[in-house]
Image: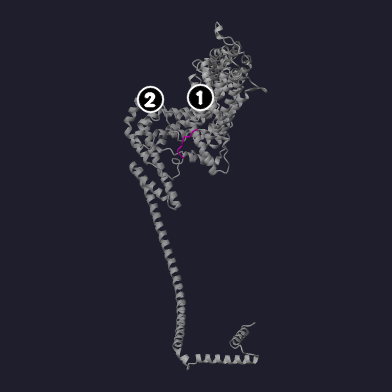
């Protein structure tokens, strides 16, 4: 329905509500027309200017008309302002375009000025370089060394400044010019120094009296000092590529050799190249020791000159002797490097090279030479990736071959020192296999102790751990012949046990060794490194198979070489040491169980003695050990005698103590508690203990028959004392049994202590007293 009809309906409803007396549609229509006419009149009255109501509202209408007029004016002004805005916007854009053109012209001008300035600076720098070059030429022609060195110093400084610019050709030109004049000055200064050294009869390759050399140096000291100072002034910028600042060696931490050392070494280098290169007989690839020993001789021969005569002329930051040795080592490494890669497949010769390099390196660190351990040396060459892999393989093959040879020897389990005098008994019991094996391990340790890189040290150490495991495995396999275990009392079994104990004790000592504490630190650091940089999981349980990625090894070594190493207890040995101790305990148990079983078999007659019917001791002229105990005593004495000969002292004492304690427990259970004793039986058992069983324990171990000895004391107590003690024990046991916790071995009462009973518990003491016939009816 439309809005119009809706309004009509609403309007009609309103009329009907106001006049409810309307009865038909005609009346309603009439009423509607009347009402509409009335409303029209009201509207006309309101908007008619002449009406009273309209006249009352004239001020409001006037204000409205003024407002409308003002609004129209404002709209006109707004339109004008919009037009002005458009014009201004167009003008601004025009000015911006003009300003951008001006700015572009300005930037172009500035760029041209900068380029011009750079060209001027470039030309000035080039002019300065040419001037320095010309001045150097003039100074050298007039032999003005001080002036030449001063000008060269300015040239080198300018070259360092130019290095920071983007002028590639100028950088190259300045570097080349500096190198050229460096070479010129180097040639002049080297020649002058060589003349002085010739006067000093340097190098000292021929024997001269020390007093003569001292006088010679004193006479020419001033000239030497002047030439040395000149050489120290001649320095290349750090960034310049030149043989003097770029080492031929690729090792971590290797620095260039100082110029004055190069001059000192020139004569020795000539001699070295003459004798150990070319067709000379001394250039024998099978004899690297010839030139290695020669280098050592040169170091020792020039020690006094370097430390006492040259060093005082240098500053404290430069060590003349160390730098001299570094120069000789570089000479040796270059020679070794030219040889070693060609002999990798020749295992005997390669092994010989390794031995000679190790001897040479070890010699460098001795007190009379005292080369720093932290500086590179010939060992770095052995740690080169290809060379080290071959070295590791050789170490692995040779060590396993030697280990197998050790056990092939017919005397492997015999003493290696049994024919030697001035040896303590335990040393004489060291087997040949154990001593030879530890010699092998120590030799390996001595070799890789000098290795400069942690990654290589860890790999060689893993081989050492592997050998320790293999040795223990071969020892345990030696305990059987065919399908049968060897006799635990045999000499071979004892020798194997001695070997296990000996190696285990040595491993225990290694845990506090600085060398292995350092390896423990590297091992811990390597685990952290692998967790951070590698995706592979580190197998902590399989140390002897450490696999170090060659791409990560150098990174790991660089990190560790720049850190201060710490010392940590070598828990890295815990696993292998535990294996040795477990095997030691297993073999100890075998011996103890075997002997105890044998003694129990032998003592069956003794356990069946009639202890309740034996004669009173007063009826004997003299008491003797029970006849049934004699065979047991002889047997055990023989066993202990053999064991004392075949086993090291501490192991023998431990075995004897354990056997005695087990047998003591056996006698206590199957002799004392299993029988009744009259006075004669108690006296006889006490006699057997004092004169028989206790003596087999030795003077220092008699206390190990504690239960039997104290039981014998209780069995032989006077009857009155025994009754009093029995009553005290029963009273104490009744109190203990009614307590919350029943303890068989409660703290001993003073009554037991007074009788010298310290090892038997209250219940055990009561049981022993119950075995006395004289107390049975009391």
Q: Is residue 12 above or below residue 390?
A: below
Magenta includes 591? Answer: no
Q: Can residue 350 be seen in this view?
A: no
| Foreground tag (2 vs 1) | 1
CA–CA distance in space, label 2 to label 1: 87 Å
- Of residues 558 and 166, which is closer to you in this image? 558
Magenta region: which residues? 562-569
- Of residues 243 and 498, which is closer to you in this image? 498
Find residue 435 and report its horizontal and vertical position in percent. 54, 22
Question: Could you tell whether 567 is left or right of 644 in the image?
Answer: left
The structure residue drawn at horizontal position 35% and vertical position 31%, both measured from the top left corner, is 309
Find residue 27 and report its horizontal and vertical position in percent. 63, 92
Q: Residue furthest bottom?
A: 50
On residue 748, the disc is: 1
The structure residue drawn at horizontal position 37% and vertical position 49%, both measured from the top left corner, is 131
- Residue identifier under label 2: 208
- Of residues 211 and 772, which is closer to you in this image? 772
């Amino acid at each position: 329905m439309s809005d119009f009809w809706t309004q009509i309906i609403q309007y009609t409803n309103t009329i009907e509500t106001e006049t409810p007396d309307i009865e038909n549609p005609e009346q309603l229509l009439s009423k509607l027309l009347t009402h509409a006419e009335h409303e029209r009149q009201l509207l006309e009255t309101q908007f008619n200017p002449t009406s009273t109501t309209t006249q009352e509202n004239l001020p409001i209408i006037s204000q409205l008309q003024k407002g409308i007029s003002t609004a129209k004016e404002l709209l006109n002004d707004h339109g004008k302002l919009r037009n002005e805005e458009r014009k201004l916007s167009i003008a601004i854009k025009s000015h911006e375009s003009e300003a951008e053109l001006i700015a572009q012209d300005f930037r172009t001008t500035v760029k041209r000025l900068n380029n011009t300035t750079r060209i001027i600076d470039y030309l000035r720098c080039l002019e300065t370089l040419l001037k320095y070059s010309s001045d150097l030429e003039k100074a050298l022609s007039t032999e003005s060394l001080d002036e030449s060195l001063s000008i060269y110093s300015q040239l080198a400084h300018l070259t360092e400044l130019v290095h920071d610019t983007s002028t590639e050709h100028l950088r190259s030109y300045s570097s080349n010019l500096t190198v050229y004049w460096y070479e010129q000055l180097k040639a002049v200064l080297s020649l002058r120094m060589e003349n002085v050294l010739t006067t000093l009869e340097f190098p000292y390759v021929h024997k001269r009296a020390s007093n003569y050399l001292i006088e010679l140096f004193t006479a020419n000291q001033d000239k030497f000092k002047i030439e040395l100072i000149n050489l120290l002034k001649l320095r290349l910028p750090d960034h310049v590529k030149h043989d003097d600042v770029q080492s031929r060696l690729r090792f971590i931490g290797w620095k260039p050799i100082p110029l004055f050392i190069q001059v000192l070494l020139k004569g020795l280098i000539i001699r070295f190249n003459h004798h150990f290169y070319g067709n000379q007989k001394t250039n024998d690839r099978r004899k690297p020791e010839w030139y290695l020993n020669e280098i050592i001789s040169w170091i020792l021969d020039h020690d006094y000159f370097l430390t006492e005569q040259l060093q005082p002329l240098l500053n404290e930051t430069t060590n003349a002797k160390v730098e001299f040795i570094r120069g000789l080592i570089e000479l040796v490494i270059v020679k070794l490097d030219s040889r070693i890669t060609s002999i990798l497949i020749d295992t005997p010769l390669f092994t010989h090279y390794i031995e000679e390099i190790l001897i040479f390196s070890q010699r460098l660190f001795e007190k009379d030479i005292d080369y720093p351990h932290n500086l590179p040396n010939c060992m770095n060459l052995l740690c080169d990736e290809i060379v080290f892999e071959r070295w590791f393989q050789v170490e692995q093959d040779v060590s396993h071959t030697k280990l197998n040879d050790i056990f092939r020897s017919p005397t492997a389990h015999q003493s290696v020192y049994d024919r030697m005098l001035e040896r303590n008994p335990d040393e004489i019991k060291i087997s040949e296999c154990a001593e030879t094996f530890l010699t092998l391990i120590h030799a390996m340790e001595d070799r890789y102790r000098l290795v400069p890189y942690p990654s290589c040290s860890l790999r060689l150490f893993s081989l050492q751990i592997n050998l320790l495991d293999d040795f223990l495995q071969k020892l345990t396999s030696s305990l059987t012949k065919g399908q049968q275990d060897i006799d635990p009392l045999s000499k071979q079994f004892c020798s194997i046990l001695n070997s296990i104990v000996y190696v285990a004790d040595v491993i225990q000592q290694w845990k506090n060794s600085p060398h292995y504490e350092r390896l423990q630190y590297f091992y811990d650091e390597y685990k952290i490194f692998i967790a951070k940089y590698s995706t592979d999981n580190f197998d902590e349980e399989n140390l002897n198979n450490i696999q170090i990625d060659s791409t990560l090894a150098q990174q790991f070594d660089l990190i560790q070489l720049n850190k201060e190493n710490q010392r940590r207890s070598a828990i890295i040995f815990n696993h292998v040491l535990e294996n040795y101790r477990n095997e030691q305990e297993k073999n100890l148990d075998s011996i103890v169980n075997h002997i105890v079983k044998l003694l129990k078999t032998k003592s069956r007659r003794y356990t069946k003695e009639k202890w309740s019917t034996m004669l009173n001791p007063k009826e004997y002229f003299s008491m003797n050990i029970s006849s049934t105990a004699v065979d047991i005593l002889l047997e055990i004495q023989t066993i202990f005698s053999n064991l004392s000969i075949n086993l090291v002292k501490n192991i023998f004492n431990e075995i004897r103590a354990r056997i005695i304690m087990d047998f003591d427990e056996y006698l206590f259970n199957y002799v004392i508690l299993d029988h009744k004793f009259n006075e004669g039986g108690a006296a006889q058992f006490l006699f057997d203990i004092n004169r028989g069983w206790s003596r087999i324990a030795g003077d220092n171990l008699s206390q190990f028959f504690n239960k039997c000895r104290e039981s014998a004391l209780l069995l032989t107590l006077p009857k009155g004392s025994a009754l009093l003690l029995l009553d005290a024990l029963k009273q104490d046991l009744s109190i203990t049994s009614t307590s919350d916790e029943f303890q068989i071995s409660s703290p001993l009462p003073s009554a037991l202590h007074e009788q010298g009973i310290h090892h038997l518990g209250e219940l055990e003491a009561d049981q022993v007293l119950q075995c006395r016939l004289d107390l049975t009816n009391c």
